[in-house]
Amino acid sequence: MFLTRWELDQLSDSATLALTELVANVVRHVPGRRCSVLLLREPYGLRVEVADAVAGTLIAKAADPLDESGRGLALVEAVTERWGVDEKGDGKTVWFECDE
């Protein structure tokens, strides 16, 4: 809905996949499964932020072909232009950006 309103429909597949992966990480790793999601229309395109209350560094890694999990951040990296983690004392914000 927001992407259509912002005329960013072309980013729908990439943004949906990346957001799904970040929220799946919250469901899997954050006690209580609480997070906040922020969608921002930027001059270059879209920025999405997922914040939670668990501190910790995240890295995209190459999963072994037989691993059942561990590819989420690598997928985010593959389908977005930029991504990163902003750590704060009471948690972190994982974000990604998709250009128009």
Image: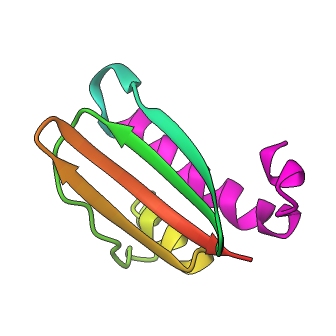
Residue 100 to residue 93: above or below:
below
| Along the line of sight, the residue nearer the viewer: 75 or 6 | 6
Give the residue at x 70% y 54%: 16
Give the residue at x 25% y 32%: 53
- Work out which residue is located at the far top of the displayed protein and give it: 32
Q: Is residue 91 left or right of residue 43?
A: left
What residue span does the magenta drawing correspond to? 1-28
| Along the line of sight, the residue nearer the viewer: 28 or 14 | 14
Image quadrant holding the C terminus, namely: bottom right
What colour scheme governs how the chains and residues are painted in the rendered image of this protein? rainbow
Q: Is residue 57 left or right of residue 2?
A: left
Residue 37 to residue 64: above or below:
above
- Work out which residue is located at the far left of the displayed protein and give it: 89
Prevailing secondary structure of the magenta residues: helix
Give the residue at x 19% y 59%: 57
Q: Is residue 16 left or right of residue 21?
A: right
Residue 10 to residue 22: above or below:
below
Give the residue at x 85% y 42%: 1
| Along the line of sight, the residue nearer the viewer: 97 or 16 | 97
User: Where's residue 73, x and y in %?
Assistant: 43, 65
- Work out which residue is located at the far front of the displayed protein and give it: 43
Residue 27 to residue 80: above or below:
above
Q: Quadrant of residue 26?
A: top left
Q: Is residue 7 magenta?
A: yes
User: Where's residue 92, x and y in %?
Assistant: 26, 46
| Along the line of sight, the residue nearer the viewer: 28 or 26 | 26
Q: Is residue 6 magenta?
A: yes
Total marks shown come to: 0
User: Where's residue 19, x and y in %?
Assistant: 58, 51
